[in-house]
Amino acid sequence: MLKEEIVSYINGIPVIKETLEDCPFANLLDMIKYYFDIYISKDIKKADCLLDNEFSKYKDTYPKLVNANDMSALITDLIFNSPENLGKNFFTALPNWMDFDENEMNRVLKHPFFDEYHNVINGFFELPRKYFMLELYTYVKVQAFATEFIPENRSVQLWYYLCYQDMIGFIYSSGFHESLAIIYKSYGKEWFCHSKITGIDLDPVLYLYASYANISCRISGLIEIDRLKNDLIDIRDELMLRSCLAGSIEQSKVYLNKIKDIITHYDDIEVKDIKQKLDVLEHENLLLKKDKETLEKTRVMLEKQISSLQFDKHRTDEEKVDSILKRLYSAMPEVISFDESITSLESIWNKLSETTRRDIKTALAVYDLYKTADLASFLLISSIEREFNLNFFAPFKRSRYYKKVKDRFCCNRKFEITHTALNDLNSIPTLGAIPFIGRAVRTKQGIESSEVIKAFGIFLGEKRKEFCCLCDAIQNYQIGLKKYNIIDIRNGVAHGDAKIKEECDEKCFEGVKALLYEPPIQIMFSVIVISMKK
């Protein structure tokens, strides 16, 4: 759509003229109505093609949904080069862009979808042209809508436009917050923070962009404020850890200061509490190399941040676990070598989830680099919890057995928590709930207490006995000199239990490893063997 042509040379340097050609829309109204219809009709096929035309199987069905990079470039040109600036080139390529029925346009713009656009534009003292930035507002907001049901791995072109081409700063400063908020809610803060360009492991400005999207979420009210505050702390902490590990604290300083300023002024309410968190985690300016001193300082920083998380009253247990895991990932080198001596997992390695494989490798690296047995054990234990969900609980909640349950009431309070863990689609059973599920599905009292528990037992079928044995192992397998079970260690790390930190030593870590992939239990191997995942 944007064709470059050499029109002349000045002192041997080519003069490039961009020509706007093959625009799929007759005029601005045609474009707005087409994209707006995708939003109104909730057309998943069109949304798929809009977000990622290049790899969409519907690309030939909708000729107006051209390559996202081309459309983004055209829209950017229409913003920063108004018809007046583009002159003849603009009118030659798009002679009828502003030639349409304005009454029809104004009728379309009365929909609440455009409320934010009106609020922003009405604040301008003077506009370069009528309906200024309407192309950008509509295009990005409909793309944001598509992120609600299109997988994150199909959003690279949107990320490239917003983050790599730095459009997010313009969108944020213009006051178009709803689009950024929707994407943030769909894909989370990590979508903004982590580069999708091969070879770029750390780009500090992306963390600032994640902060902008977080503020947009706050303004739009899509996510509760406490979670957004926690996210901001996480964004700042991850940038600090990764910059420290890379020896680039000085280069990241300007972005860290901007994020710190955002946190400090985020909300007048409870700002004192947030400042205290900042004071605890203030760091001296380090010019580090990747050596023993760097690792030691990273370890100290890591333990301070995890300690802050463990006693954070504004996070649920699940949120603490998730944030601790992400801190551990951030404190690791980008490339982690795998312990080749672990041959027991070779046959099932590719059947484990990508996150579980990362947890196991990170656990070995954490112990090797920092000798923190409690944190390394925590990573391995978290992988058990995740694989139980992926191989048993998630398949059940997608199954016909779950969908056929009509009575979702539990008639016995003793099994109410177990019933809820299996019934709730918005959460997964925690490690501590798994032994109770195993006991419930093999007892008459448990099965009679809940149609959901009964359905799960039927779902397991002939694998019920083996499943229950694995549940028992989680409760009964004893680790280390103090005979902890893995639930004790998982909860102890999540809550900052001083005894667990002190007493979870090398023997504990070796015990957890043995539970995962050594006879007689080999729990990870057993989970894959009796998996209910199709």
Image (cartoon, rainbow, N blue to C red):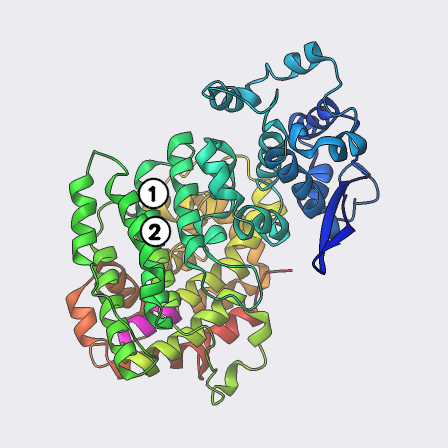
Image vertical order of residue 301 relative to residue 174, above or below: below
Q: Is residue 479 visible?
A: no
Q: Position of residue 192 (x, y in %)?
A: 48, 51
Q: Is residue 400 left or right of residue 325?
A: right
Query: Which amino acid type corresponds to the residue marked 1 in the rendered image?
Result: Arg
Name the residue carrying label 1: 227
**Horizontal and vertical percent position of residue 141:** 58, 33
Graded by Cα atoms within 10 Å as few (under 14), some (14 to 19) or many (20 or more), the crowding at tag 2 reads some
The magenta segment: 373-381
Per the picture, the main secondary structure of the magenta-coloured stretch is: helix
Residue 366 in sight from this viewpoint: yes
Which amino acid is tagged 2? Glu
Q: Could you tell me which secondary element the residue under label 2 belongs to?
A: helix
| Residue 480 part of the magenta segment | no
Label 1 with label 2: CB-CB less than 8 Å: yes
Q: Quadrant of the N terminus?
A: top right
Checking the image for residue 51, the label placed there is none
- Residue 413 point in image, percent of width and height: 32, 41
Q: Nearer the viewer, mark 1 or mark 2?
A: 1
Which residue corresponds to the image point at 46% horizontal and 19% vertical from the top-left?
125
Whether the magenta-drawn stretch holds residue 377 is answered as yes
Q: Between residues 247 and 525, which one lies in front from this camera angle?
A: 247
Q: Residue 476's spot in the image, x, y percent?
A: 32, 71
* Secondary structure category for the residue under label 1: helix
Height in image: 301 above or below 89? below
Name the residue at 32% across, 49% down: 259
Q: What residue does disc 2 label?
A: 319
Residue 146 falls in image quadrant: top right
Front position in the image: 385 or 151: 151
Please identify the quarter of the rendering in which residue 448 is found. top left
The answer to which of 475 and 25 lies nearer the viewer is 25
Image quarter of residue 474: bottom left
